[in-house]
Amino acid sequence: MPEPLDVGLFVPCYVDQLAPEVGLATACVLERAGCRVHYDAGQTCCGQPFLNMGATAAGTRLAQRHLDIFQKYETIVCPSGSCTATVRRRYPEFGVGADEAGHAQRARTFELGEFLVRRLERTGLGARFPHRVAVLSSCHGLRDLGLGSASENLGTRERSPTEVLLGEVEGLSLVPSLRDECCGFGGSFAVRLPEVSARMGRARLREWADAGAEYVTGTDVSCLLHLEGIRQREGSGPEAIHLAEILARTEDR
């Protein structure tokens, strides 16, 4: 048998604080896929919210700290498309990780589904989830990381790693999504324009509910928390669940 791959687990700060079960599920899935998972408790925010809001001094300090902490890992995996995209795509814009070593480290940072499908070529992980599930193609994963085919691109549509993995889950029925519009979260957008943000989220939930979805899943906890908050306030719509939580399940519950 091949040697297990050592993986550094990159847990976004909002996962750590608001949805730690997603971090635990990610570790479980990676171990089931044959990886040795390492977690550095000294990790903090990757700097994304600060960089997005123009607080570049604080953001670049956090970005550099992130690279310093994770430089010891040959492979880095994160259950967040937006945080992965920040490391891979945005750090050089602020002069962080722009050298050869930084480029190599950023290139070996993966979103969870991307890592399983494109790096490990593992799709069947023994998961069981007998429900109708819709997929949220989050903006960062779709357009910054190329996790699927965006609707504005012409040509043959490519299934996202999330869709590939869900296709191997026993009992799961994938609900087709009509479009790949933003869920309305958008980080600081939801704070600056909460009414518009909530309206966008309600529209997506209604679309999935009308299609018969019981759950909506994706790669970004932030987007899923936004949708779940709306669902609970409205009292209707599919329940939000992260991809890692589905892949970690092996029995009905």
Image: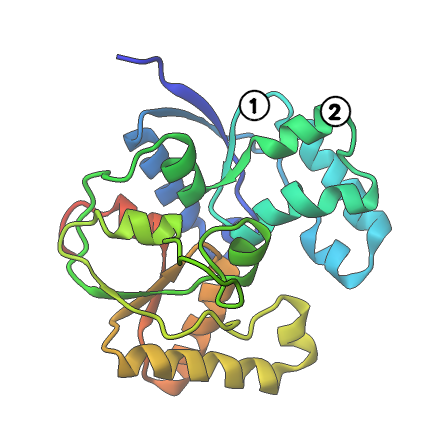
Q: Mark 2: which secondary structure?
A: helix
Q: Is residue 91 above or below residue 186?
A: above
Residue 6: give its label.
Answer: none
Q: Mark 1: which secondary structure?
A: loop
Residue 186 image offset from top left, x and y in percent: 61, 68
Residue 182 image offset from top left, x and y in percent: 53, 71
**In this rendering, would 92 be left or right of 133?**
right
Judging by the rendered image, the residue that carries numbered circle 2 is 100
**In this rendering, would 6 be left or right of 51?**
left
Please give the name of the residue rendered at 29% of the width and 80% of the height, measured from the top-left corner.
Answer: 209
Q: Residues within 10 Å of mark 1 (few under 14, many from 20)?
A: some
- In-front residue for pair 117/220: 117
* Residue 46 seen: no
Location of the C terminus (image quadrant) = bottom left
- In-front residue for pair 187/111: 111
- In-front residue for pair 82/117: 117
Judging by the rendered image, the residue that carries numbered circle 1 is 73
Please give the name of the residue rendered at 65% of the width and 24% of the height, measured from the top-left corner.
Answer: 71
Q: Residues within 10 Å of mark 2 (few under 14, many from 20)?
A: few
Mark 1 vs mark 2, CA separation in Å: 16 Å
Please give the name of the residue rendered at 13% of the width and 56% of the height, measured from the top-left corner.
Answer: 171
- Point out the residue furthest to the right here: 57
* Residue 128 seen: yes
Q: Amino acid at mark 1?
A: Tyr
